[in-house]
Amino acid sequence: MMKFGARVWIARILITWGIVSVLTGFAQNEVHLYILRFLLGVAEAGFFPGIILYFTYWFRSKEQATTVALFTAAIPVSYIIGAPLSTWIMDHIQWWGIQGWRWMLILEGAPAVIMGIVTYFYLTERPENAKWLTDEEKSWLISSLKEERVKEECKASQHLKSPGRSESVVSLCHLFRLSDREPWCGILDAADY
């Protein structure tokens, strides 16, 4: 996603997911259905991690937990809305002699394609590119995110440079050195074959 950008990555996932979903409505046999369902999984595989990464471009760490929680809470809400809608489509839509289950896949895949196109043209990659933020809001958000990343990098580099300074690491090293057995031997001895 970092190579292509969030806008292109998320749009591609939505469009391919929608197209494969619509095509599933035209499957003629089990093999077609299995192949299309596999391709559907491939098409949507990067969506969740892509969205989570996209959130890191816009939210500080202390806000990311709430943002991810709200995003994941939308999943069961979509089931609450989607299940009755899907049932209604299957029971009531039989246009042009096409069965309801096929219409369900076609009608529920088409909005993903449309939203993928909208995403491509309207999703803002990063705060620097946001036309809808004032200059003051942009500078605050960019500086807050940058400051947080610098602090995180400093913490990470300190942890990597100083494992020997940690009392717990030193104590564990001494215990390991003093032990005459491998750490997992006790587990293997206790196992009853």
Image: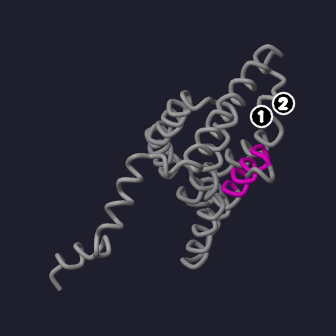
Report the Cα–Cα distance between label 1 and label 2.
6 Å
Q: Amino acid at mark 1?
A: Arg
Q: Nearer the viewer, residue 173 or 38?
A: 173
Dominant secondary structure (helix, strand or loop) of the stretch shown in magenta: helix
Q: Quadrant of the C terminus?
A: bottom left
Q: Nearer the viewer, residue 27 or 78?
A: 78
Which residue ends up furthest to the bottom in the rendered image?
193
* Quarter of image, res 42: bottom right
Name the residue carrying label 2.
Answer: 129
Q: Position of residue 73 (x, y in %)?
A: 46, 36
Give the magenta-colored segment's residue range. 5-18
Q: Position of residue 178 (x, y in %)?
A: 30, 67
Q: Amino acid at mark 2?
A: Asn
Name the residue carrying label 1.
Answer: 126
SS of the residue at dot 1?
loop
* Quarter of image, res 183: bottom left
